[in-house]
Image (tube, helix red, strand yellow):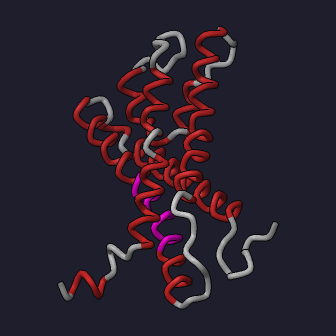
Amino acid sequence: MGYFDKSGRRSFPKLLLTGFLFMLFGNLLCTIMTISIAPFISMDFIKVMIFIFALAVFYSLIFTVGYRDGDNEQKYVRLHKAEPPKSTKWLVIGIILMLIMFIPSVVLLLDKLCGWYFDFTLVHRIICGMVYPLSLMLVPESTIDSMQEFVPFVYMLCYAGIPAAAHLGYYFGYTQKFDKDKLMYK
């Protein structure tokens, strides 16, 4: 299976890879943002603000990847090069991406429950950059022993909006909700 199908559209694996890379980039940006504010991170207000900004950055990137594909699909349909695509495509991709982001939290939970000798807390914070500021609030001692068992589920809940953000991005791109000509002349 190639990267493009007969009509020139990107194939499902290519879209999944693109979504994964955007998700990875979003987590990386959130990690850098959290580390760069380290001198002020002792204040709870700053932790809350950084977490809100991290949510906004991460979900805007997930929205953007769906939006770009929806905009591209609209062009193919408008030029009669292809028939309309399945509307649930980005919902499925979002579910797969969400399950991928659940893996580090499941490993963190298993680390806590099984008593492994490897403290996965710091690695989890770097991999899951969007929840890094939240983890500083929930686990301030930064050790697996001080973490409660419910904390990995809270992290998973933070990533549960990925399918909705990806699908909304695709919908807005496909229906041309942000078309600059429509916005300017209304």
Q: In which quarter of the image is residue 21?
A: bottom right
Rendered residue at 38%/67% (across/down): 172
Q: Which residue lies furthest to the left in this view?
A: 186
Q: Residue 69 at what x, y percent from top left?
A: 53, 70
Q: Residue 51 at what x, y percent from top left?
A: 34, 40
Q: Main secondary structure of the magenta part?
A: helix
Give the extent of the magenta segment. 59-70
Q: Residue 43 at what x, y percent from top left?
A: 25, 30
- Is residue 23 part of the magenta span, yes or no? no
Q: Which residue lies furthest to the front in this view?
A: 83
Nearest to the observer: residue 35 or residue 93? 93
Rendered residue at 49%/63% (across/down): 66
Q: Is residue 78 depicted above or below 140 in this figure?
A: below
Rendered residue at 34%/38% (across/down): 39
Q: Residue 130 at what x, y percent from top left?
A: 45, 42
Q: In which quarter of the image is residue 14?
A: bottom right
Q: In this view, does 72 lie to the left or right of 38?
A: right
Nearest to the observer: residue 46 or residue 168? 168
Quadrant position of the C terminus in the picture? bottom left
Q: Is residue 146 depicted above or below 93 in this figure?
A: above
Nearest to the observer: residue 144 or residue 73? 73
Q: Is residue 85 left or right of residue 11?
A: left
Quadrant position of the N terminus in the picture? bottom right
- Is residue 66 part of the magenta span, yes or no? yes
Q: Number of labelled discs?
A: 0
